Amino acid sequence: MNVGRSLLTTAEWQARAEAHRERVQQFTGPWRERRARGDVHPVYDFLFQYYHYPAGKLETWHPDAHERVIDSREARARFTAPAYATADGEIRRDARLLVPKDRDTLDHALQVLRATEARPAHFGCYGMHEWAMVYGGHEVRHAEIAPLRLPQAEVDAFVESRPVACSHFDAFRFFAPAAKPMNRVPLVWATRHDSEQPGCIHANMDLYRWAFTAMPWIGSDLLWACFTLAMELRVLDMQAGPYDLAAMGFAPVRIETSEGRDEYQRRQRELSERGSALRARLIDAVSAIAVQGVSRGP
């Protein structure tokens, strides 16, 4: 898709930067307050804890990939090297300034995104990964703030009664040792991306990872879209888990029942469709960077 190159005035980009900061701070503000108190929210804090993208960077706005800003004192203070360059009265990103290490990182992200997009989507896992993580009472991670909503024996019996088909290594690696042999998909670190598929809620959550990996080149609007999708996926992830989150306002998706599994799969499919659209946008954006980014030479 060809997008016309837009030139933003100082007033235009400042307004968008402020609007972006305000929407992001709906999440980063409470996260900072909880962290200062030593509190943890098992749902909303996950993206900050697991992905380690600084809240300040998430709040900092960057223009979309096709946009430039008019050169000004304010713009020069905001949009700086090494990503931005000034020429002909404009400030724009220049992918030729990418160092080889960063270019390799983007190439890897693009490979994973394309490979995941090319695989068929599967929707038969039903969120069993969270149950496999606490199988046998192994490291119930949220025990102090979100206890199990079923007795441990019932949790274990449910894991043993259902197929476990996790395709995402970074979920599988947290399985209880006794639950790992139950997984139908063989997963190892060396080939961890080879099984990722577009139906997986973790592969779609990781779109946020690949988006911030590609910052500031892709722009904050696409990053924010990936963040909000990841947050909705995390909500479903925890609702379908064995935890009691009623005190936090989250009703369980009872995947131990056929009705709960139907609800999980319906929501999983809806979120996967959004993930597929964002994955395609990421592939287009990162591909454009790869085409533009040529070695500067010695």
Image (cartoon, rainbow, N blue to C red):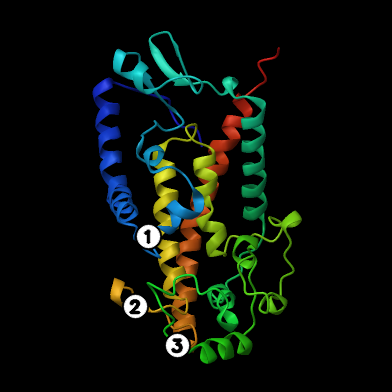
Find numbered disc 3 in the image and state the secondary structure of the residue it sits on: loop
Q: What's the amino acid at mark 2?
A: Ala
Residue in the image at 41% along x and 79% along y = 147
Residue in front for this viewpoint, 208 or 124:
208
Instruction: Count neighbours of disc 2 (C-alpha within 10 A) and say few if under 14, some if 14 to 19, many if 20 or more.
Output: few
Residue that numbered label 3 is attached to? 150
Can you say which quadrant of the picture contains the C terminus? top right
Find numbered disc 2 in the image and state the secondary structure of the residue it sits on: loop
Residue in the image at 50% along x and 87% along y = 256
Relative placement, left or right, of 292 versus 17 is right
Q: Write down the quadrant of residue 210 in the picture.
A: top right
Q: Write down the quadrant of residue 149 in the picture.
A: bottom left
Looking at this view, name the residue that lies furthest to the top: 88
Find numbered disc 1 in the image and state the secondary structure of the residue it sits on: loop
On the image, the x and y values in percent for residue 142 come to 44, 71
Residue that numbered label 1 is attached to? 44
Residue that numbered label 2 is attached to? 251
On the image, the x and y values in percent for residue 193 come to 68, 55
Residue in front for this viewpoint, 210 or 171:
171
- Position of residue 21 relative to residue 252, above or below, is above
Residue 178, numbered circle: none
Reading the chain from its start, which is encountered first: label 3 or label 2?
A: 3
- Position of residue 37 relative to residue 54, above or below, is below
